[in-house]
Image (tube, rainbow, N blue to C red):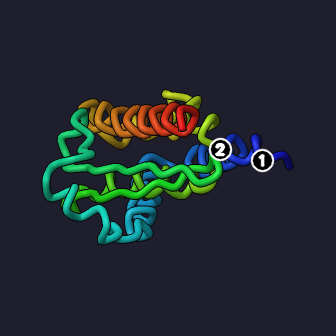
Amino acid sequence: MAASDDLTDRLNQIAEEFGELEPRERLELLLDYAERLPPLPDKYKAERDAGQHRVRECQTPVFIWVELTDGRVELFADVAPEAPTVKGFVSLLQEAFHAASAAQVAACEQNLVQRLGLAESLGMIRMRGLAGILFAIRKQVQVAMANAAGS
């Protein structure tokens, strides 16, 4: 399998897994993902505490950092513990995007939230927040790509 296909394959597999579940079970799977989100590395905590890297489109306090290493994405995040579904979505993205090419993450389908079938389980405000998280990640990847090209 070519490296450029890795992310597409991962997202298709995740969407298929969610698609086989009932709406309540999709929420449970999202909660399972929430438990897998690693703690924020210490090097980002001061920026988080200063309100930097917050995803403004989401009502839940969500903070995202993107690093590129050899054109591959590494995502770091901190999500308020009182929002386990949002935390689960961020964890899902972190796992899916891990070591994917920056170009592919930047081009990731914006309708991923709908594709996972979460609309039936989550309200519209939360759906917009999740879409905002994905948009923020894609934007940070695009900026990181531009910065890497300029160096």
Residue wearing tag 1 = 3
Q: Nearer the viewer, residue 15 or 51?
A: 51
Q: Earlier in the sequence, mark 2 or mark 1?
A: 1
Q: Residue at x 42, y 40 (%)?
A: 137
124 shown above or below 49: above
Q: Residue at x 46, y 54 (%)?
A: 75
Residue 35 visible in the displayed image: yes
Circle 2/circle 1 CB separation < 8 Å: yes
Q: Amino acid at mark 1?
A: Ala
Q: Nearer the viewer, residue 29 or 147?
A: 147
Q: Relative to residue 87, is residue 54 drawn left or right?
A: left
Q: Which residue sits furthest front?
A: 151
SS at badge 1:
helix
Give residue 120's position: percent from left, percent from top: 39, 37
Residue 120 visible in the displayed image: no
Q: Residues within 10 Å of mark 1 (few under 14, many from 20)?
A: few
Q: Residue at x 15, y 58 (%)?
A: 49
